[in-house]
């Protein structure tokens, strides 16, 4: 794809490595390229789950490339389809993404991880949104997604002071799914990805869609909305061949063969 992105297909799994030494920072050009990759992932029916990680062992991503900023790239620059890092504003991506955080995830790097559906991190990982110390704000999802996960006092401290969250604290607060050794990081991410592949793709898409469109609603309202027929993936699941295949495979004590239809 580019010198900065290494993209590998492994069956139904797409692996993306952001590789921009020394800190895997993201400028507008790289963000556009990441948007192209995530668009390809969204549109390819053979791909069911993606893993995004950083090159090296120190940085997942330091976020916005401050060298590019110093050279004139504005905070509100055009970062391409999907917003910053190609995914922070890709709201119609109904396939799961796993962030394998191999080190520091700061600023937009943390926002990239937060835009994923699951996070596995190495023991040396840490997370921060230090934008206020740079005169800007974490407006690529940090101010919107992180308060849904963290207690408000912890979020406020992170946002207003730049406090770092360690890997163990991130696990404690439910920001990440697992903390593993650096050597086991990609194995764990791939293990989860393989488990996702074993689930019916339409069901996975419906799960993402329902949460994305109704998590802000009261439960009763969310029930009505889900049953309204306005959703794309949920009605498709109910009427799909896979909805027949799953129970049949269970009854016949065999693995299901998903068709995605």
Image (cartoon, rainbow, N blue to C red):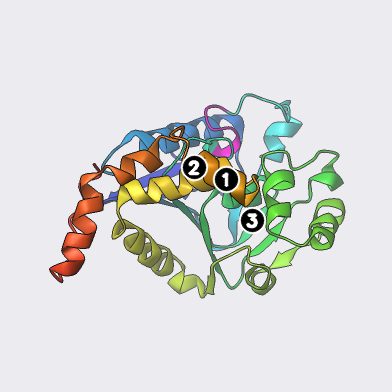
- Observer-nearest residue: 30 or 87? 87
Q: Range of the magenta residues?
A: 80-85
Please give left or right for residue 185 compared with residue 23 in the image. left
The residue carrying pointer 2 sits among few (fewer than 14), some (14 to 19) or many (20 or more) residues within 10 Å by Cα, namely some
Classed neighbour count for the residue bearing mark 1: other residues with Cα under 10 Å, few (<14), some (14–19), many (≥20): some
Residue 244 locus on image (x, y percent):
20, 53
Residue at the farthest left position: 252
Whether label 3 touches label 1, CB < 8 Å: no
- 218 on left or right of 212: right
Distance between the Cα atoms at labels 1 and 2? 6 Å
Depicted 199 relative to depicted 9: above or below: below
Q: CA distance from mark 3 to mark 2?
A: 35 Å
Q: Sequence order check: which comes first, mark 3 or mark 2? A: 3
Nearer to us in this view, 85 or 30: 85
In what element is the residue under mark 2? Answer: helix
Of labels 3 and 2, the one closer to you:
2
Q: Considering only order in the chain, which callout, 1 or 3, is on the residue closer to the N terminus?
A: 3
Q: Which residue is mark 3?
A: 105
For disc 2, the marked residue is 226
**Residue 14 appears in the figure:** no
Q: Is residue 257 left or right of residue 156?
A: left
Residue 159 — which label?
none
Q: Secondary structure at mark 1?
A: helix
Which SS class for mark 3? strand
User: What is the magenta segment's predominant secondary structure?
Assistant: loop
Residue where numbered disc 1 is placed: 222
Query: Which quadrant of the figure has residue 59?
Result: bottom right
Quarter of the rendering occupied by the N terminus: top left
Q: Nearer the viewer, residue 35 or 95?
A: 95
């Amino acid at each position: 794809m580019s010198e900065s992105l290494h993209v590998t297909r492994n069956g139904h799994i797409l692996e993306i490595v952001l590789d921009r030494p020394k800190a895997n920072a993201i400028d507008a050009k790289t963000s556009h390229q990441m948007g192209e990759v995530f668009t390809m992932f969204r549109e390819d029916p053979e791909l069911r789950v993606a893993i995004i990680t950083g090159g090296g062992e120190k940085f997942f991503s330091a976020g916005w490339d401050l060298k590019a900023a110093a050279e004139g790239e504005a905070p509100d620059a055009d970062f391409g389809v999907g917003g910053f890092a190609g995914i922070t504003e890709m709201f119609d991506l109904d396939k799961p993404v796993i962030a394998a955080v191999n080190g520091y995830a700061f600023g937009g790097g943390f926002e990239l991880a937060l835009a994923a559906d699951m996070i596995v991190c190495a023991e040396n990982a840490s997370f921060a949104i230090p934008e206020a110390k740079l005169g800007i704000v974490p407006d690529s999802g940090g101010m919107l997604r992180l308060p849904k996960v963290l207690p408000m006092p912890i979020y406020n401290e992170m946002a207003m002071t730049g406090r770092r969250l360690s890997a163990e604290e991130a696990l404690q607060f439910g920001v990440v799914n697992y903390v593993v050794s650096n050597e086991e990081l990609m194995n764990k991410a791939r293990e989860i990805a393989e488990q996702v592949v074993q689930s019916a793709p339409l069901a996975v898409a419906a799960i993402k869609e329902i949460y994305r469109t109704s998590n802000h609603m009261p439960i009763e309202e969310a029930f009505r909305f889900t049953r309204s027929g306005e959703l794309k993936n949920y009605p498709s699941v109910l009427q799909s061949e896979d909805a027949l295949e799953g129970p049949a495979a269970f009854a016949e004590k065999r693995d299901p063969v998903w068709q995605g239809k």
